[in-house]
Amino acid sequence: MKARFGKVAVLFGGTSAEREVSLMSGAAVLAALQGAGVDAHAFDPAERDLHALKDEGFERAFIALHGRGGEDGTVQGALELMGIPYTGSGVMASALSMDKWRTKMVWLACGLPTPRYAILDAGTDWDAVVAELGLPIYVKPVHEGSSMGATKVVAAEQLQAAWELAARYDSLVIAEEFIEGQELTAPFLEDQALPLVRIVAPDGNYDYQHKYFTDDTRYDCPCGLPAGQEAELRALVMKSARVLGCRGWGRGDLILTAEGKPYLLEMNTSPGMTSHSLVPMSARVAGLEFDALCLKILEGARLG
């Protein structure tokens, strides 16, 4: 196994608001790779200069960073320049998928369904946004994940405070219409979508705490949809990933209304790999245990 992959850096931690989750993801991946006999080593870009990867002879990188500085194309670009193959999407797809606004523009241009939205700033007419999108409204930073800085607005007078919270995380803030329905996620590995996971959070509030630190959220995998309908949704997620240029592995999030209409929400190019994470859960149902999943992702590491 050591000869197959060479010296591998597991990049985790970093400086983003999602550092805490990344530390958990990276620790799990590192343990799995080392347990499988891979010459894998921890590497935290918040504590060490990335150039050390080249100086110390690393031959591959498993990216378990989340958020800005790790999932947005910056680390991917540095690895490209150093000639070190890495897991997941390339520079362009990483940057594009991290940007919720531009992701939506690409999807809409390709005729893919996604909720209506508005970009917010200090001069926004809050009443006009409510009139256009209705209530509730989700307000979130454009370049953050894991529900960081996100608020579900249920009354017009809450909108400005929600924008102010999101603006602490990002200069770009988006408001998105609320779509009532089942929350689903579809991981993918190379060119195949894995089984859908249905997320049932307390009071429909799938926030940071419920994602990573409580056992109150229920995850159904298999998701319970008819096989034909699930196949269509998995195909939709793969198309949504392809038009963004994604590769390797990732996870698309969507909502399915009671009428059976899907709406794409976000694309994640470096999803969580914690004990509560959705990609390992789905992969297990597809017959791929965690160690094998990590090896499969590492196998897909490349440049360009």
Image (cartoon, helix red, strand yellow):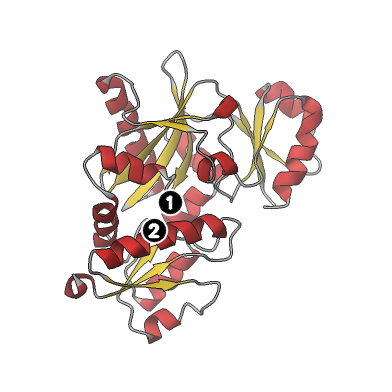
* Quarter of the figure with the N terminus: bottom left
List x then y, in percent, for residue 114: 50, 30
- Are discs 2 and 1 less than 8 Å apart at CB? yes
Q: Residues within 10 Å of mark 1 (few under 14, many from 20)?
A: some
State the SS at label 1: loop
Identify which amino acid the numbered label 2 is placed on.
Ala
Q: Residue 28: which disc?
A: 2
Of residues 222 and 134, the one drawn nearer to the viewer in this rendering: 222
- Residue at 18 percent of width and 75 percent of height: 3
Q: Quadrant of residue 5?
A: bottom left
What's the distance in space between the residues labelled 2 and 1, CA to CA? Answer: 7 Å
Q: Name, please, the residue furthest toward the bottom.
A: 55
- Residue at 50 percent of width and 21 percent of height: 181
Please indicate, yes or no, whether residue 273 appears anywhere in the rendered image: yes
Q: Name, please, the residue furthest toward the top.
A: 259
Q: Residue 274: which disc?
A: 1
Image: 176 above or below 295? above
Identify which amino acid the numbered label 1 is placed on.
Thr
